[in-house]
Image: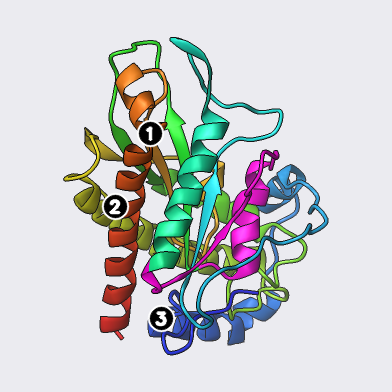
């Protein structure tokens, strides 16, 4: 279930999408169409893993009724992430958790949003669980926090990833092939729709989500530029599993290179974490202010 904060309304159920959904679901095609035997939908159905049993959800902090930001500290548990070659004791999973906590605290201090962390301790979550937790909580924005790494120790700077269009097409096909599709899109029950209809609706929603994600990535880059060293081409697109929620704006924030001594020391310092958290706070506040003004 995807909830929305009071006064804003569903962020992705635009008039055009709702009209398209109702028209398609009410049409004869929606009632009669079925995927051809052995077609793409049948092949895709075989690739979708069985749903995992829902686990305990993390605590949401902040003022009730405010938009919800879910922050995901990358890696954890038996997965240390990248390691600093110049300092064997520095692990990505530890840095991302420190950064996620700092971002949470800075956002909560603003009083403008609610915040939840996918993990607030050293534990392992599979990629699907990470954005799955955010969707179950009804998140309005998902930020996955990571540290980059490269063989070239001179590589440095933060970057921001959003989902690529090619990845969107493939994910829409896989989602449309699921047996239980009732909870794929907020407010639109796809359980009785054909694979073709479902794929169209999921694709429409995911493309809108991708636009919102890219807009937030550019906004975060603008706010971070005075505070955090960024790569010149800081906004990138990739087929990353953690970004594939179809109806929730999502970014992956590569906060700097753990393989670069200067970057890593900055990420592991109080001042460096405060600067990153402040850039996120500014971007988040502008993001939701724009959405409110657009109503």
Query: 208 left or right of 5?
Result: left
Q: Nearer the viewer, mark 3 or mark 1?
A: 1
**What is the secondary structure assignment of the residue under circle 1?**
loop
Rounded to the nearest angstrom, the CA distance separating label 3 from label 1 is: 43 Å
Pick whichever of labels 3 and 1 is earlier in the sequence.
3
Q: Are marks 2 and 1 in contact (CB under 8 Å)?
A: no
Whole-percent x, y for residue 224 in the image: 24, 47
Q: How many marks?
A: 3
**What is the secondary structure assignment of the residue under circle 3?**
loop
Residue 266: quadrant of the picture: top left
Q: Nearer the viewer, mark 3 or mark 2?
A: 2
- Which residue is at a point 63% across and 43% down the rendered structure image? 127
Q: Mark on residue 60?
A: none
Q: Is residue 256 visible?
A: yes
Query: 143 left or right of 97?
Result: left
Query: 175 left or right of 276?
Result: right
Q: Which residue is mark 3?
A: 14
Whole-percent x, y for residue 63 in the image: 50, 78
Q: Nearer the viewer, mark 2 or mark 1?
A: 1
For the residue pair 44 and 7, the one nearer the viewer reads as 7
Query: 141 left or right of 192?
Result: left
Q: Mark on residue 279?
A: 2
Query: What is the residue that sits farthest to the front in this orientation?
Result: 270
Pick whichever of labels 3 and 2 is earlier in the sequence.
3
Q: Which residue is mark 1?
A: 269
- In this picture, which residue range is highlighted in magenta? 110-139
Rounded to the nearest angstrom, the CA distance separating label 3 from label 2 is: 29 Å
Pick whichever of labels 2 and 1 is earlier in the sequence.
1
Is 39 within the magenta?
no
Position of 258 relative to 103 (above/below): above
Rounded to the nearest angstrom, the CA distance separating label 2 from label 1 is: 16 Å
Mark 2 nearby-residue class (10 Å; few <14, some 14–19, many ≥20): many
């Amino acid at each position: 279930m995807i909830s929305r904060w009071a006064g804003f309304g569903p962020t992705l159920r635009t008039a055009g999408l709702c009209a398209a959904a109702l028209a398609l679901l009410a049409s004869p095609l929606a009632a009669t169409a079925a995927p051809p035997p052995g077609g793409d939908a049948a092949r895709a159905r075989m690739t979708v893993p069985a749903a995992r049993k829902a686990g305990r959800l993390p605590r949401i902090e902040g003022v009730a009724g405010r938009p919800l930001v879910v922050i995901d500290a990358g890696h954890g548990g038996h997965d240390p992430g990248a390691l600093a070659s110049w300092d064997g004791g520095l692990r990505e999973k530890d840095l991302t958790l420190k950064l996620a906590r700092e971002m949470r605290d800075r956002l909560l201090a603003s009083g403008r949003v609610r915040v939840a962390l996918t993990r607030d301790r050293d534990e392992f979550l599979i990629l699907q669980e990470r954005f799955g937790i955010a969707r179950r909580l009804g998140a309005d924005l998902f930020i996955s926090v990571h540290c980059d790494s490269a063989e070239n120790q001179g590589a440095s700077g933060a970057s921001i990833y959003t989902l690529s269009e090619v990845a969107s097409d493939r994910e829409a096909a896989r989602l449309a092939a699921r047996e239980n599709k009732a909870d794929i899109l907020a407010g639109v029950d796809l359980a009785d729709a054909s694979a073709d209809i479902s794929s169209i609706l999921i694709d429409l929603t995911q493309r809108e989500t991708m636009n919102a994600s890219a807009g937030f990535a550019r906004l975060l880059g603008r706010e971070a530029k005075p505070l955090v060293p960024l790569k010149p081409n800081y906004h990138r697109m990739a087929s990353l599993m953690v970004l594939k929620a179809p109806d929730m704006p999502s970014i992956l924030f590569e906060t700097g290179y753990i393989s670069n001594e200067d970057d890593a020391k900055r990420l592991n310092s109080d001042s460096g974490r405060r600067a990153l958290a402040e850039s996120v706070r500014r971007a988040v506040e502008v993001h939701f202010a724009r959405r409110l003004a657009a109503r």
